[in-house]
C-alpha cells in the first residue's frame, strides 16, 4: 500500500548578487528538478491547463493537517511518468516546476525588528545551476539578466496565486467537499498498486450544495475550478497507461 505525501526539503540559500554573480542557469535542466517527484503543488490559476494533462488531487500535510492541491505525476513514490528520455512529456509544465531552482524564503527584517521579510533563495542541490555552463543570471555590472527576470516572473506569479489557492482550498473544507480517494490498480504485468493518502472533490456533495453556496463559489470564480479538479481525476487512466508503457519499455 502506498501512502502519498508531498514532503520535500531542498537545500536553500539566499541569492546574493555579489556572491552569486557568476551563477548560471541551465534551462534544459529546470524540469529535471522534478524528475523523481510523484506530487507537485498545483496553483489556482493553472487548474484548467493542468486538467488537460494531469490528475489534480488534494493532499494533506502530515505535520499541519492542512490540505493543498497537487498534480499526480506517478503511481509510486519518487516516480514521475511525465519525465521520459530526459524531457518533460506534456504540453503544459506546472508553475512549481518551471520556477525551479528558485524559492521564496523569509529572514528577519533589519529595518523592522521582530518582523520578517521575503527573500529570494536558490536550491544549491539543483541540477539547473552551474558556475561554468548555461546562461548568466547577472551581467558584469551585477544587474539582472532577461533569463533571471523570466524566472523571477514565475515566482511572482506564484506569490500572487498562493492566497487565492489557499482560500479556494479553505472554501472546499468549509463546504465539506473534500473526500478521500482510494485507488486499487492492476497493471498489465499483474502488479497490484493500492494508493491511499490522496483526496478529491466529491461530485455528489458538489451537486447537493445550496443555491447560496453555489453562488458564493461562482462569485469567487471557484466553481469552474471545482469542476476542473473533479473531472481531472479521469487522467489517472492515462497515468496508468503511461505506467504500463514504462514497464513494457523496460522489459523490452
Image (spheres, rainbow, N blue to C red):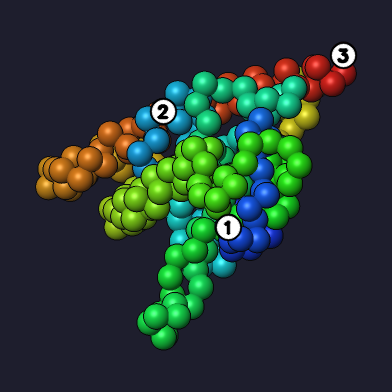
Q: Tag 2's secondary structure?
A: helix
Residue 88 has which mark?
none
Residue that carries the numbered disc 1 in the rendered image: 17
CA–CA distance in space, label 3 to label 2:
33 Å
Residue 252 position in % (x across, y down): 87, 13
Residue at left offset 57%, top offset 45%: 139
Residue 149 position in % (x across, y down): 47, 42
Direction from residue 193 to residue 62 in the image, left or right: left
CA–CA distance in space, label 1 to label 3:
49 Å
| Marks 1,3: beta carbons within 8 A | no
Crowd around label 1: few <14 · some 14–19 · many ≥20 (10 Å): some
Mark 2 and mark 1 lie on one chain; the one further toward the N terminus is 1
Residue 252 has which mark?
3
Direction from residue 200 to residue 222 in the image, left or right: left
Residue 29 position in % (x across, y down): 68, 35
Mark 3 and mark 2 lie on one chain; the one further toward the N terminus is 2
CA–CA distance in space, label 2 to label 1:
35 Å
Residue 219 placement: quadrant: top left
| Marks 2,1: beta carbons within 8 A | no
Residue that carries the numbered disc 2 in the rendered image: 49
For this rendering, which residue is in front, 67 or 139? Answer: 139
| Marks 3,2: beta carbons within 8 A | no
Residue 77 position in % (x across, y down): 71, 44
Q: Tag 1's secondary structure?
A: loop
Residue at left offset 63%, top offset 26%: 88
Mark 1 and mark 3 lie on one chain; the one further toward the N terminus is 1
For this rendering, which residue is in front, 190 or 46? Answer: 46
Residue 151 in sight: no
Crowd around label 2: few <14 · some 14–19 · many ≥20 (10 Å): some
Q: Foreground mark, 1 or 3?
A: 1
Q: Residue farthest to the top?
A: 252
Amino acid at each position: 500500500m502506498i501512502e502519498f505525501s508531498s514532503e520535500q526539503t531542498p537545500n536553500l540559500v539566499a541569492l546574493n548578487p555579489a556572491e552569486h554573480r557568476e551563477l548560471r542557469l541551465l534551462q534544459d535542466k529546470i524540469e529535471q528538478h522534478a524528475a523523481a517527484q510523484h506530487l507537485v503543488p498545483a496553483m489556482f490559476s493553472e487548474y484548467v491547463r493542468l486538467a488537460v494533462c494531469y490528475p489534480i488531487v488534494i493532499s494533506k500535510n502530515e505535520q499541519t493537517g492542512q490540505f493543498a492541491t497537487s498534480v499526480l505525476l506517478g503511481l509510486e513514490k519518487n516516480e514521475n511518468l511525465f519525465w521520459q528520455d530526459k524531457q518533460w512529456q506534456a504540453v503544459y509544465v506546472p508553475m512549481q516546476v518551471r520556477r525551479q531552482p528558485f524559492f521564496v524564503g523569509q529572514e528577519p527584517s533589519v529595518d523592522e525588528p521582530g518582523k520578517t521579510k521575503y527573500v529570494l533563495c536558490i536550491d544549491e542541490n539543483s541540477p539547473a545551476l552551474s558556475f561554468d555552463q548555461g546562461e548568466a543570471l547577472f551581467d558584469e555590472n551585477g544587474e539582472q539578466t532577461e533569463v533571471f527576470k523570466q524566472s523571477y516572473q514565475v515566482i511572482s506569479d506564484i506569490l500572487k496565486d498562493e492566497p487565492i489557492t489557499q482560500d479556494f482550498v479553505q472554501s472546499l473544507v468549509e463546504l465539506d467537499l473534500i473526500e478521500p480517494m482510494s485507488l486499487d490498480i492492476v497493471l498489465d504485468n499483474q502488479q497490484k498498486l493500492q494508493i491511499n493518502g490522496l483526496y478529491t472533490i466529491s461530485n455528489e456533495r458538489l451537486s447537493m450544495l445550496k443555491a447560496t453556496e453555489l453562488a458564493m463559489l461562482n462569485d469567487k470564480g471557484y466553481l469552474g475550478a471545482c469542476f476542473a479538479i473533479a473531472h481531472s481525476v479521469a487522467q489517472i487512466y492515462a497515468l496508468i497507461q503511461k505506467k504500463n508503457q514504462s514497464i513494457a519499455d523496460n522489459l523490452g
